[in-house]
Image: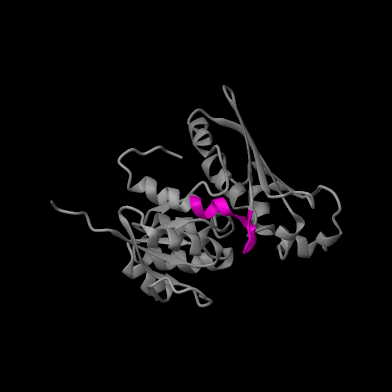
Amino acid sequence: MMTTPSIKVGIAGVGAIGSAVAKALNEGIKGFSLECVSDPKITTDFGVVNTDFATLTNRCDLVIECLPANIVPQLALAAFSANTDIIFISTAALLTYQQILEQLGKSNSRAYVPSGALCGIDGVLAMKEMGINSAQIASTKPPKGFGGAPYVTLNNIGLSNISKKTLIFEGNALEAAKGFPANVNVAATLSLAGIGAQNTRVEIWADPNAKGNMHEITVKSDYSTLTSKIENMPDPSNPKSSILAAQSIVATLRNMSSALVISQ
């Protein structure tokens, strides 16, 4: 009986999210094998070579992006030049660096966007088929989760001084992506699935009493109203991200190789 060769997977960035995905691949995901990683600050041995973006994208059939938003365009260019497929988890970068999607359209690569720390994307995609009138998301995190965000720095927001739940940003998804590139991948994903960054409203709340990262979305059409709420524990090694983000990538991989596909 002939066996189908495993899809060779490369991971760019093996911090909190990338490490979890690498571990899952090494433990076994049907149809996929970890081929190499790329991270100059690597601290864990995953049993594969650590290389540069060009080598990673040429050696692998599929690349998983787990990078800071400002580095994503470099990986995307390398992947598209090699016509290698890519999974994006830093979806805020797709809004702030528009050349990524422009380059994607000129390549033979295919890009995948997991649901990340969000729920209800399947419903949003279905509603888009009949027309969405409005989409909004309210994200709440402990104040320390917003540390280093450009918007916080620019507006001199004293995160340590916040003593109650406080609205620190309100605007559209593009503005949110620019101001909070490490915090609003969920808002970016919602905008990509729905009515675009300019039309997706975003609220960002800092709550010192929050135990996790919470996202509430409301999407309306002429015929349906979708509301969802999910609360995820922040990753202990990266409070800007939820533990569920890594597992959404793993679920995407398992779904790609499954005989029964349940669409997100």
Colour pattern: one colour
- Image position of 118 with respect to 227: above or below: below
| Magenta stretch contains residue 141 | no
Q: Can residue 157 be seen in this view?
A: no
Image location of residue 253, percent across then percent down: 39, 51
Question: From this viewpoint, which residue is outermost toward the left?
Answer: 1
| Magenta stretch contains residue 236 | yes
* Residue located 43% across and 58% down the image: 24
Image location of residue 136, percent across then percent down: 66, 39
Image location of residue 121, percent across then percent down: 52, 39
Q: How many labels does the image show?
A: 0
Question: From this viewpoint, which residue is outermost toward the front?
Answer: 27
Image quadrant assignment for residue 214: top right
- Image position of 237 with respect to 233: above or below: below
Give the magenta range.
234-247
Q: Is residue 236 visible?
A: yes
Report the front residue among 123 and 141.
141
* Residue located 52% across and 30% down the image: 127
* Residue located 38% across and 53% down the image: 110
Report the front residue among 111 and 77.
111
Question: From this viewpoint, which residue is outermost toward the top?
Answer: 223
Tell me if 143 is positioned left or right of 227 in this view. Answer: right
Image location of residue 106, percent across then percent down: 38, 58
- Image position of 141 with respect to 39: above or below: above
